[in-house]
Amino acid sequence: MGRREIVVIGASAGGIEPVKELIAALPADLGGIVLVVIHLPADGETALPQILDREAKLPVALAKDGDSLQPGKVLVAPPGQHLMVIEDSVSLSSGPRESGFRPAIDVLFRSAAMAHGPRVIGVILSGALDDGAAGMVAIRLRGGVGIVQDPGDAQHSSMPRAAIDAAVVEHVVPVVEIPRLLLELTGEELPASDVSESALIDIETTMIAQSTSGADTIEPPGRPAGLVCPDCSGPLYEISEGRLTRYRCRVGHAWSPLSLASQQSTEVEDALWTAAETLEEKAILRERLGSRARADGRDATAQEFLRAAEAARETAMQIRRLIEDRDRLRARRSRLGASRSLTRQRCTARRYGWSRSAMASSRSP
């Protein structure tokens, strides 16, 4: 069956430094190709390939549609486009976003798993939320190998933890140990084994690759969830895959549980700000109408307008206080998360016998 020679890497918040460290440590004779997705702003260009290429022994380039899967190079997903594996080459797609991202880690992992099954090695590094968890499930279901950065070693542990929870990954290690693992795994002959097929993986990969909607398929992707897609306001369908539950609409937008909850929170805050602004405008209008009524000698009408203006301003202030309370709670949780992350990193350092200076030097560019 050949060798494991397709390495797919996903990272998000706090992930650029680990990716740099990992790529720099890979040897020039690595027996595989490395495909990288990092969540970056969709607008403009990225200098990430040049940054990675400075210290890499492997050539690093921005992926282009049709690039071959020839071993011995690193391809990075361009901003605003999904990076996919289609047969023996890569493809770029402007298909629906997944978990609010394009490029999305899940798309790369799922397409690689569909095309090459056990030849794929998936690597999840530091990141917020849970993009990559569904993709790691697909890799494992198709016989591939999973590697996840030890959450205690990650600046943001949410993405590694989500992948560990969703898929039975073989290796949970700090970044410094991943290059050695990849070198071992890409040098192994694959044992003969049956690879399970997945109609779901095929359907979802095709939806992104060809930008076809679920309406073009015989069955919708899952069962009705009673929820609305934040991107298109279409109905969401609930998909159960392994230990993971996630959502997709007929257009093709996909949402993990954490990304959907995060987007809903954003929409709630936007709605609250809109309500506060509308109420404040209502107060201004009522005050103007009250002033005109008083100038015309209609005191009773003026008082009615002014009372309405006062009520609108009070309600707007209550909404603003609610938003401020949410912001303070979010900041408190962020500080607590940072403190826990530092504690986890110290515990990881003790577990692997590192000194603080060794940790610092391993992170330095």
Image (spheres, helix red, strand yellow):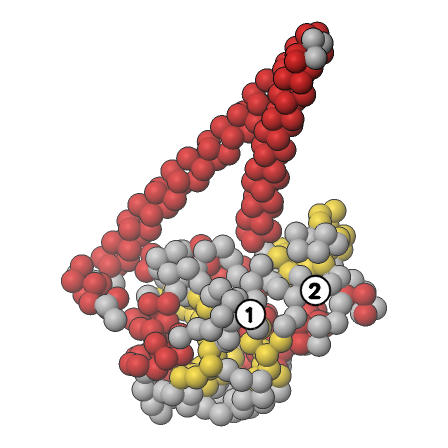
**Tag 1 residue:** 80
Q: Residues within 10 Å of mark 2 (few under 14, many from 20)?
A: many
Q: Residues within 10 Å of mark 1 (few under 14, many from 20)?
A: many
* Nearest to the observer: residue 80 or residue 354: 80
Give residue 354's quadrant in the image: bottom left
Q: Is residue 162 left or right of residue 337?
A: right
Label 1 or label 2, whichever lies nearer to me, is: 1
Disc 2 marks which amino acid? Gly
> Tag 2's secondary structure?
loop
- Furthest-front residue in this view: 296
Whole-percent x, y for residue 357 in the image = 16, 62
Whole-percent x, y for residue 297 in the image = 69, 8
**Disc count in the image?**
2
Whole-percent x, y for residue 356 in the image = 18, 59
Give residue 142's quadrant in the image: bottom right
Q: Is residue 363 left or right of residue 107?
A: left
Disc 1 marks which amino acid? Gly
When the figure is inspected, residue 183 is found, relative to residue 280, above or below; the finding is below
When the figure is inspected, residue 286 is found, relative to residue 121, above or below; the finding is above
When the figure is inspected, residue 151 is found, relative to residue 301, above or below; the finding is below
Disc 1 from disc 2: Cα separation: 16 Å
Q: Is residue 190 left or right of residue 173?
A: right
Name the residue located 57 percent from the left edge and 23 percent from the top edge: 313
* Residue 169 appears in view: no
C-beta proximity under 8 Å, tags 1 and 2: no
Whole-percent x, y for residue 249 in the image = 72, 59
Tell me the tag on residue 138: none
Name the residue located 61 percent from the left edge and 24 percent from the top edge: 283
> Tag 1's secondary structure?
loop
Tell me the tag on residue 252: 2
* Residue 66 appears in view: yes
> Of the residues under marks 1 and 2, which one precedes in the sequence?
1
